[in-house]
Image (spheres, rainbow, N blue to C red):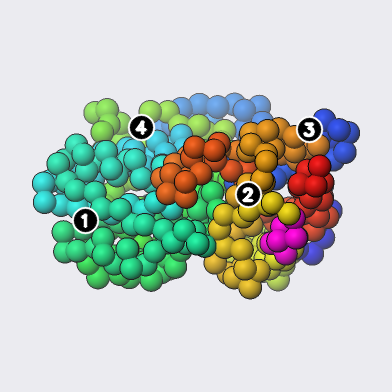
C-alpha cells in the first residue's frame, strides 16, 4: 500500500491503545475488520436525516428505496454479479440457511450434496440440514493435513451425476487456504451440480467474482470488508426466480426482494455503500480509474494493491514464525506459496493453552482469536479440537510490517519464557 499511516488515519479504532498503553494490534480481522470514518459517518448521517420503511408515499421513504438500489449496485461491483442478483440479510449464515431451506424443497432421496472439511460451519450446516430434511445424501471432501489444503482427489471422488450442489469456501477463515475455485467450479459443473461459494473470509483480501468464476451462489459479509454488520448473497437470477423462499404473503414477490424477509437494516446499507466507496477510492489511489461512481474496475484495483501488500506481510510472518521455538503453524507455511493463502495464521505454542496464549497476547495489546472459530470439521480433522484449538492471527491491508514484527516478537518472548 502506498502510505499505510495515512490510510490507517481513516480508521479511528486503529489508533486506540491496548491495555499496556502501546497502540493495539488488531490481529483479529478474520473475525471482522475495523471501519473507516466514512462508513461511520454514512450510517450516523442516514439516522440523523431520518429513516423510514420502504415503498412509502413520502420523500424519506423514496430515499431509502434509492439507497437500497445503490447498495445493490455497489454489492454487484464488489461481487462480480448483477444488481438484480444481490440479496441482503442479517449476515451470511442467516442468508445461507434461508436459501438452503428453499433448495431443500427441490431435493429428494437419491440426490447428493457435497460439503468440505475446510469450510466454516456456515457453508456446511445449512446444506447438510437441507439434505437431511429432503432425505438426500451428504458427501464430504477431505483436506490434506500436511499443508491444510483441500484434497482434490477427495473432491473428485465426492462428485457424481447425483450431485445437486457443491458448497466450498473461497478461503478458510481458520488457516487462510484459498482452494483453486475456478477449477472446482468447472469440475462441479461438469458433474451437473450447482456451486455455493463462501466468500466471507476472502472478501477482506481478494476480489470476489460470481460471474468470472461461473458460480451459482456466493456469500459475503460487509463487516469483514470494512463495512457494517450485514450479509450479502449474490445468486444467479434464475435460482432467485425458480426457487421459492419462505416469506410472508404481502411482501414483494419479485426477485431479489422476495428473498429479503422483514425490514432490513437501512442504516447499514448506507455503511455498505461507504465501504465499497472506500475500496473504490483505494483503487483509484493505486492506479485505478479516477474517482467518481463505484465501478468494478476501481474495486479490482484496490484488491490488487491489497494482494501485493498482504503477500509481503504473509512472507514476513511465515519467515519469522519459522524461527520461533515450539511455535507450530497449521496451514501453508512455505513463503513461496503466498498465492494460495490469505494472511490468516492458526498457530499453537508448545506449553501454552490457546486461550491462555490469546489472553496473554491481549494483555500485551495484540488482539487475536482462539478456539476453532466455527471451522469445527477442520479442527476435528486436524486433531486440534481437544486441546483448545489454536490461536488465530490475521492481518489485512491496513496492517504494517512493524505490526507483524511486534506480534512475532511477543510470540518469541512467550516461547522463550
Ligand atoms: C469463512 C466464513 N464463512 C461464514 C462466516 C459467517 O458469516 P456471518 O457472520 O456473516 O454469518 C464467517 C464468519 O466469521 C466466515 O469467516
Front: mark 4 or 2: 2
Circle 4 residue: 261
How many C-alpha atoms fall within 10 Å of the one at disc 3: few (<14), some, or many (≥20)?
A: some
- Is 228 magenta? The answer is no
* Nearest to the observer: residue 408 or residue 65: 408
Question: In this rendering, would 99 be left or right of 388?
Answer: left
Circle 2 residue: 347
Mark 4 to mark 2 CA distance (whole Å):
40 Å
Q: Are marks 3 and 2 in contact (CB under 8 Å)?
A: no
The answer to whether mark 4 is within 8 Å of ligand 1 is no
- Is 318 magenta? The answer is yes
* Nearest to the observer: residue 53 or residue 312: 312
Which one is earlier in the sequence, the residue at label 4 or at label 3?
A: 4
Mark 1 to mark 4 CA distance (whole Å):
26 Å
Circle 3 residue: 363
Image location of residue 1, percent across then percent down: 75, 63
Q: Which residue is painted at 55% across and 36% down in the image?
A: 388
Q: Which residue is painted at 41% across and 58% down in the image?
A: 143
Circle 1 residue: 164
Image location of residue 8, percent across then percent down: 79, 49
Q: Are marks 4 and 2 in contact (CB under 8 Å)?
A: no
Mark 4 to mark 3 CA distance (whole Å):
42 Å
Front: mark 3 or 2: 2
The quarter of the displayed image where residue 205 is located: bottom right
Which one is earlier in the sequence, the residue at label 4 or at label 2?
A: 4
Amino acid at each position: 500500500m502506498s502510505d499505510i499511516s495515512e490510510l490507517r488515519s481513516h480508521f479511528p479504532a486503529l489508533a486506540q491503545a491496548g491495555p499496556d498503553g502501546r497502540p493495539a494490534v488488531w490481529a483479529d480481522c478474520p473475525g471482522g475488520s475495523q471501519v473507516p470514518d466514512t462508513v461511520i459517518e454514512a450510517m450516523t448521517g442516514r439516522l440523523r436525516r431520518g429513516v423510514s420503511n420502504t415503498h412509502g408515499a413520502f420523500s424519506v421513504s423514496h430515499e431509502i428505496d434509492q439507497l437500497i438500489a445503490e447498495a445493490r449496485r455497489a454489492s454487484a461491483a464488489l461481487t462480480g454479479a448483477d444488481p438484480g442478483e444481490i440479496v441482503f440479510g442479517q449476515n451470511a449464515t442467516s442468508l445461507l440457511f434461508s436459501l438452503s431451506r428453499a433448495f431443500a424443497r427441490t431435493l429428494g432421496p437419491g440426490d447428493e450434496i457435497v460439503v468440505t472439511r475446510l469450510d466454516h460451519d456456515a457453508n456446511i450446516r445449512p446444506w447438510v440440514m437441507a439434505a437431511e430434511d429432503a432425505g438426500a445424501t451428504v458427501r464430504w471432501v477431505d483436506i490434506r493435513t500436511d499443508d491444510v489444503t483441500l484434497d482434490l482427489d477427495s473432491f473428485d471422488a465426492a462428485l457424481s451425476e447425483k450431485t445437486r450442489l457443491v458448497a466450498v469456501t473461497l478461503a478458510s477463515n481458520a488457516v487462510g487456504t484459498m482452494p483453486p475455485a475456478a477449477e472446482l467450479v468447472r469440475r462441479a459443473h461438469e458433474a451437473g451440480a450447482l456451486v455455493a461459494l463462501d466468500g466471507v473470509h476472502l472478501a477482506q483480501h481478494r476480489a470476489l467474482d460470481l460471474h468470472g468464476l461461473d458460480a451459482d451462489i456466493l456469500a459475503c459479509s460487509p463487516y469483514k470488508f470494512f463495512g457494517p454488520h450485514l450479509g450479502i448473497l449474490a445468486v444467479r437470477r434464475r435460482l432467485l426466480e425458480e426457487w421459492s423462499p419462505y416469506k410472508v404473503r404481502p411482501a414483494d414477490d419479485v426477485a431479489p426482494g422476495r428473498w429479503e424477509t422483514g425490514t432490513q437494516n437501512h442504516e447499514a446499507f448506507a455503511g455498505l455503500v461507504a465501504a465499497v466507496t472506500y475500496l473504490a477510492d483505494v483503487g483509484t489511489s493505486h492506479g485505478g480509474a479516477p474517482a467518481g461512481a463505484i465501478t468494478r474496475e476501481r474495486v479490482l484495483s484496490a484488491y490488487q494493491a491489497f494482494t501485493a501488500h498482504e503477500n509481503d506481510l504473509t512472507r514476513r510472518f511465515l519467515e519469522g514464525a519459522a524461527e520461533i521455538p515450539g511455535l507450530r503453524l497449521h496451514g501453508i507455511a512455505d513463503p513461496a506459496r503466498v498465492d494460495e493463502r490469505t494472511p490468516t495464521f492458526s498457530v499453537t505454542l508448545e506449553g501454552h493453552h490457546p486461550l491462555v496464549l490469546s489472553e496473554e497476547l491481549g494483555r500485551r495489546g495484540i488482539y487475536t482469536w482462539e478456539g476453532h472459530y466455527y471451522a469445527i470439521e477442520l479442527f476435528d480433522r486436524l486433531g486440534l479440537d481437544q486441546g483448545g484449538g489454536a490461536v488465530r492471527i490475521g492481518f489485512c491491508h491496513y496492517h504494517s510490517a512493524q505490526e507483524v514484527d511486534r506480534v512475532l516478537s511477543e510470540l518469541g518472548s512467550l516461547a522463550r519464557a
